[in-house]
Amino acid sequence: MDDGPATMTMRRRMGFAVLAAATAVLAGCASGPQVTPITTMPAPRPSGTAETRALAPTVQPVGEPTEVASGLDAPWSILRLPDGATLISERDTADVLELLPDGSTRVAGHVDGVQPSGQGGLLGLAFLPEGDWVYAYLTASDDNRIVRMPLTGSPGSLGLGEPETILTGIAKAGNHDGGRLAFGPDGMLYATAGDASNGDRAQDKASLNGKILRITPTGGVPDGNPFGTLVWSMGHRNPQGIAWDSAGTMYASEFGQNTWDELNVITPGANYGWPVVEGVAGDSRFTDPVTQWPTSDASPSGLAIVSDTLFMTGLRGERVWSIRPDATDAPTDWFAGTYGRIRDAVAGPDGSLWFITNNTDGRGDPRSGDDRLYQVALGTT
């Protein structure tokens, strides 16, 4: 970088504040939800947290979504930086885009070594403020891997430095590549790794596939991992979105095979049953999901938490689900069939929700201007 770290951080924060103000758009007219019968069980709480910390009030979409950006090519991950700027990964171009205040985008960086194929390519993004690192999960020639790149520049001219590989050896395939990244409340990096079309890997503790991984920011095994390896939980088919509520409960959405898609509460060392079971099985060897959907209604991907309300995106289901596993109410679906396949969701500015469509990924029905990033206001129920 041309400037020192302190100067660059100040410039970035000033630019981020302007960007956040320029992109905050609130929606207007009311929209009613649709309710689909599903299976829901009360979510367990982490030991010692449920009694000491009340969850925030439930929120839901208010009005219709408004368009923030368009013309995206198979977008996969939305990364909102701490001071308001936004990066978007494109699976097949291997570009990381910067969202500009007027809704246009520019290429902040191209990630070399990505070899898109099927569901693989440039997938999840995450950000570590200490050192200004952008992390990416990607499909390379021989495997899926995780790299990190220094974030350079200031808003309007953000860039990415040379990638540093922190993890290799996650088996790849044309599908079930996983790919979501997120830093947890403990400062560790979490990654979802699919079974790469081989269900046996999910039950093999020596394999990284069919797992949720917990990794130090430099790629090492953190203290507290249940098996002394990078594996945090196992028995997953194709886990996707991951998020934490304010009590520290970790959730993950997961693609099912033919019957049930899942929302799971993730605990270290737990086995979620794939390929032996799918959905709620009542088998004491495995941990059941807290919520399950028919695969036609969900095919879940991204997962965001706003005010302790979970928002899960659906690809085949072409909708956004709002979920409160601590409540007796069934999850509610929003915008079903309106915007097509929905890949990712994140907390937007001013308590809103952002979500991104995925109609240009080869499985959708692209419309003029696709793919798009949308924003919808949220209000308490």
Image (cartoon, grey):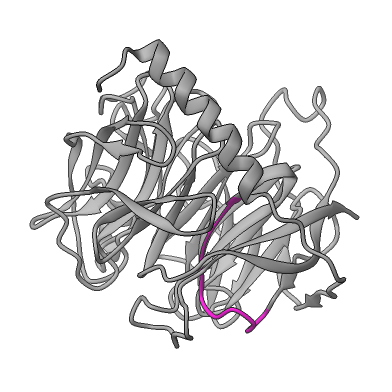
Res 365 seen here: yes
Q: Is residue 246 above or below residue 179?
A: above
Write the start and end of the magenta stretch as one range. Answer: 336-346
Q: Which residue lies at the image location 45% right of the left edge and 57% below the top edge?
A: 240
Q: Which residue lies at the image location 29% right of the left edge and 60% below the top edge?
A: 177
Q: Is residue 344 magenta?
A: yes
Q: Is residue 341 magenta?
A: yes
In the depicted view, which residue is nearer to us: 95 or 202?
A: 95
Q: Is residue 139 above or below residue 109?
A: below
Residue 16: x %, y % from top left: 54, 34
Residue 379: x %, y % from top left: 85, 53
Give the left or right position of residue 219, taking residue 82 as reference: left
Can you say which quadrant of the picture contains the C terminus?
bottom right
Q: Which residue lies at the image location 63% right of the left edge and 47% below the top edge?
A: 22
Res 192 seen here: no
Image quarter of residue 262: bottom right
Residue 75: x %, y % from top left: 40, 64
In the depicted view, which residue is nearer to us: 41 or 339?
A: 339
Residue 33: x %, y % from top left: 81, 74
Q: Which residue lies at the image location 65% right of the left edge and 68% below the top edge?
A: 320
Q: Is residue 124 above or below residue 34?
A: above
> Count of labels shown?
0
- Among all residues in the image, which is located at the extreme left? 141
Q: Is residue 8 above or below residue 275?
A: above
Give the left or right position of residue 13, taking residue 189 as reference: right
Can you say which quadrant of the picture contains the N terminus?
top left
